Image (tube, helix red, strand yellow):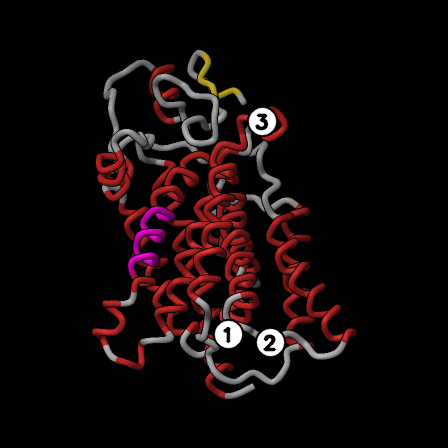
């Protein structure tokens, strides 16, 4: 492993910590803001950014994104993403110790599985050099098309009875698909960075990265309002990791271990890392934190209302004209001032 690749992997870990912290802060702000309306996207964005928690979370997560881009310029995308997947460890610690969110035993088991997978990956990692930025545009278009085809079912999957109540995690996974497309496009842009700013601005994959990134941010904000912080963040990260690791291997030719034994161990490591992230969302029975009137300047309404109406306002209520689906429904019902799931 060259020094550049090692620095890239270290930056990947820093990016993971910053991203998880930012997402937890965004979740707190989103939970305390008025519900998003997909028919009024600009107004919904304004309401979210009225929250200091959400705005600060966006800033920190964006800084983590810049560090991530730097890591992609130094190391293969699949390996960087494997390191970032191990950031699920920091998500658990931050959620429980800093934000006071309970972490059930199964979630910690997922964290341990992810960490074990990272150790296996490090043991089997071949000698790495370079950033691996060469790819085929035709293959990239096919890869992105497959990912886009997966995002729609994720957005509306909770209409299936057996997935009801998992809206937040499923929407988070859909946003993760778009984040993955954006990341892979950014990796493509990194390949032309040496040709100067003009080459970067004229690269069509820059537009793909920006557009899909903005879509991902909007969808993710809805997921943070609908589900609990740990589940949503974990499923979003799972989708991003699968997309980026797959893109690195299939598009950019990232190396795998040599020999049958090494390949099997490395494949098991990737499966453990992703499975660890998948095991984490087990908090469906824990309601999202209730909002507080007047906190941090978030948009509030109905001042002076009765206790029951105030409780309904502070709870993560469904929007008017309830739609039983992943996009519009949070699976939460207000009954005489209380919350019933």
Which badge, 1 or 2, is on the more N-terminal residue? 1
Check disc 3 and report the residue beneath it.
160
Residue 201 horizontal side relative to residue 29, left or right: left
Q: Nearer the viewer, residue 260 or 111?
A: 260
| Residue neighbourhood size for the residue with mark 3, other residues' Cα within 10 Å, grouped as few (<14), some (14–19), many (≥20) | few
- Magenta region: which residues? 207-217
Q: What is the magenta segment's predominant secondary structure?
A: helix
Screen quadrant of the N terminus: bottom right
Q: Position of residue 197 (x, y in %)?
A: 22, 75
Q: Is residue 44 above or below residue 341?
A: below
What percent of the width, then of the height, locates residue 269?
Answer: 68, 65
Q: Is residue 61 magenta?
A: no
Q: Earlier in the sequence, mark 3 or mark 2?
A: 3
Q: Residue 122 shows which numbered tag?
A: none
Q: Which residue is mark 2?
A: 255
The mark nearer the N terminus, 1 or 3, is 1
Residue 65 in the image: x percent, y percent?
A: 37, 63
Q: CA distance from mark 3 to mark 2?
A: 39 Å
Q: Return the residue at label 1.
A: 76
Task: Tell me which residue sits at (34%, 36%) in the image.
Answer: 32
Residue at x 35%, y 51% (from the top left corner): 212
């Amino acid at each position: 492993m060259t020094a550049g690749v090692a620095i890239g992997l270290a930056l990947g870990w820093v990016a993971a910590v910053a991203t998880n912290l930012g997402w937890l802060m965004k979740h707190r702000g989103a939970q305390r803001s008025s519900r998003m309306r997909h028919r009024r996207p600009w107004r919904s964005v304004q309401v979210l950014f009225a929250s200091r928690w959400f705005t600060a979370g966006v800033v920190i997560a964006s800084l983590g994104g810049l560090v991530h881009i730097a890591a992609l310029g130094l190391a293969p995308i699949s390996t960087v993403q494997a390191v970032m997947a191990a950031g699920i460890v920091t998500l658990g610690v931050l959620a429980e110790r800093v934000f006071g969110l309970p972490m059930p035993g199964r979630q910690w088991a997922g964290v341990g599985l992810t960490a074990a997978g990272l150790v296996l990956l490090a043991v089997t990692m071949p000698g790495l050099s370079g950033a691996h930025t060469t790819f085929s545009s035709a293959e990239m278009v096919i890869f992105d098309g497959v990912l886009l085809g997966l995002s729609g079912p994720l957005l509306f999957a909770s209409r299936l009875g057996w997935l009801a109540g998992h809206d937040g995690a499923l929407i988070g996974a859909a946003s993760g698909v778009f984040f993955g497309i954006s990341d892979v496009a950014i990796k493509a842009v990194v390949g032309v960075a040496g040709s100067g700013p003009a080459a970067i601005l004229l690269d069509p994959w820059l537009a793909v990265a920006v557009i899909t990134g903005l879509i991902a941010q909007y969808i993710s904000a809805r997921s943070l309002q609908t589900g609990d912080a740990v589940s949503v963040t974990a499923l979003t990260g799972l989708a991003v990791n699968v997309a980026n690791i797959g893109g690195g291997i299939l598009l950019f030719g990232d190396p795998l271990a040599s020999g049958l034994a090494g390949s099997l161990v490395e494949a098991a490591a990737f499966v453990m890392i992703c499975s660890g992230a998948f095991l984490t969302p087990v908090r469906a029975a824990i309601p999202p934190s209730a909002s507080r009137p007047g906190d941090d300047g978030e948009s509030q309404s109905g001042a002076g209302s009765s206790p029951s109406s105030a409780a309904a306002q502070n709870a993560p209520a469904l929007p008017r004209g309830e739609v039983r689906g992943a996009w519009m429904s949070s699976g939460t019902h207000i009954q005489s001032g209380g919350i019933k799931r």
